[in-house]
Image (cartoon, rainbow, N blue to C red):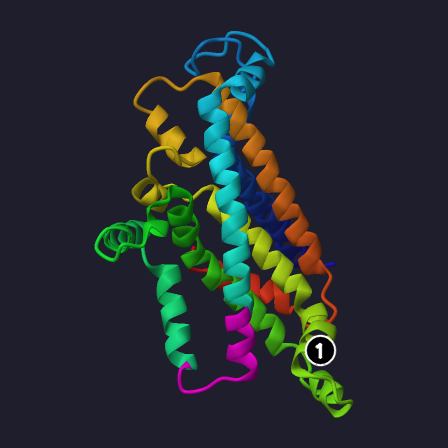
């Protein structure tokens, strides 16, 4: 082994070590604030300005606070409703774009792309007068309900995410399977329930879970469309910034973080189980989240 080869390998080793250290510093920079919130959720003090001691009392206070529990329940119900609505719409759109594309398909893709890249503040400003007009000028009292407004508003972005995930799965699925079921005189509904849906179920479930998690942290849109009595958790936290943040807010935020991590872990496990073997679910997830 020559001296030049040894020096070259040494440079590679030093370069890998430097890149590893830089990556670790990046991770620390990104996740250190989250770690601080988790640690301060066990603070025995009255505010988050200083850590005075370890205690689980903030968790007990958070669970006993009606305002906090109401905000959490609103967020969870909104997330569940958003998951249902966006999964139905996104799955239908993904199947239609893959199996029955027409002249409308490019326009729909453009609209879905615009939904994903449009700033949230623009969407929020657009939705507010629309809801007000529907609830007053058009007399549709249904849209005066705060929970309905939140579900509809959060379903806009989530539906686009589910559409791209399901579309990627459908594109990687062999259409001959559905044709074989049709040759065996299976009705369109039977083909969908027995062939198509089981094969795309990882994408559908992943899309639903992602829609659930995306709805939990939607602050900008929720702050515009929410009404009194239907304040979701992110809006409650934002309003609490006017005063000093209390440890119970950090405690409940830690619980919501744990819920989000569990849901994302389930999504990761589902995406790893790819019956088509082409990674359609993972690629669809990557493409769908580019605009986030």
Residue located at (54% from left, 44% from top): 23
For mark 1, give the secondary structure. Answer: helix
Horizontal side of 61 relative to 206 (left or right) equals left
Where residue 1 appears, as percent x and y from the top left, is 74, 58
**Whether residue 164 is situated above or below residue 151 in the rendered picture:** below
Horizontal side of 10 relative to 129 (left or right) equals right
Where residue 162 appears, as percent x and y from the top left, is 53, 62
Q: Is residue 282 shown in magenta?
A: no
> Which stretch is magenta?
92-104
Residue 177, quarter of picture:
bottom right
Q: Is residue 95 shown in magenta?
A: yes
Horizontal side of 214 relative to 152 (left or right) equals right
Residue located at (30% from left, 50% from top): 124
Q: Please say whether residue 26 is visible from this viewpoint.
A: no
Question: Toward the viewer: 147 or 172?
Answer: 147
- Classified by dominant secondary structure, the portion drawn in magenta counts as helix
Residue wearing tag 1: 190
Q: Please say whether residue 16 is visible from this viewpoint.
A: yes
**Whether residue 104 is situated above or below residue 11 in the rendered picture:** below
Outermost residue toward the bottom in this view: 183
């Amino acid at each position: 082994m020559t001296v030049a080869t040894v020096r070259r390998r040494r440079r590679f080793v030093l370069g890998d070590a430097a890149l590893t250290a830089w990556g670790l510093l990046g991770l620390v920079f990104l996740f250190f604030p989250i770690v601080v919130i988790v640690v301060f959720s066990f603070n025995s003090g009255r505010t988050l300005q200083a850590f005075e001691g370890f205690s689980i009392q903030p968790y007990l206070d958070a669970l006993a606070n009606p305002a906090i529990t109401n905000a959490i329940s609103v967020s969870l119900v909104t997330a569940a409703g958003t998951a249902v609505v966006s999964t139905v719409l996104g799955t239908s759109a993904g199947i239609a774009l893959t199996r029955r594309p027409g002249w409308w398909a490019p326009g729909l893709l453009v609209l879905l792309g615009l939904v994903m890249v449009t700033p949230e503040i623009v969407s929020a400003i657009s939705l507010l007068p629309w809801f007000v007009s529907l609830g007053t000028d058009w007399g549709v009292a249904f849209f005066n309900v705060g929970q309905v407004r939140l579900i509809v508003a959060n379903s806009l972005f989530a539906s686009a995410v589910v559409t791209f995930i399901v579309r990627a799965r459908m594109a990687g699925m062999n259409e001959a399977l559905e044709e074989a079921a049709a040759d065996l005189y299976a009705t369109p509904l039977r083909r969908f329930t027995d062939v198509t849906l089981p094969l795309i179920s990882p994408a559908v479930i992943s899309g639903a879970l992602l829609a659930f998690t995306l709805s939990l942290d939607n602050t900008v849109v929720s702050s515009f469309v929410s009404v009194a009595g239907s304040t979701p958790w992110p809006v409650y936290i934002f309003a609490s910034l006017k005063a000093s943040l209390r440890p119970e807010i950090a405690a409940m935020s830690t619980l919501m973080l744990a819920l989000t991590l569990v849901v994302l872990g389930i999504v990761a496990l589902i995406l790893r189980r790819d019956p088509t073997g082409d990674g359609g679910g993972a690629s669809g997830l990557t493409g769908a989240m580019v605009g986030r």
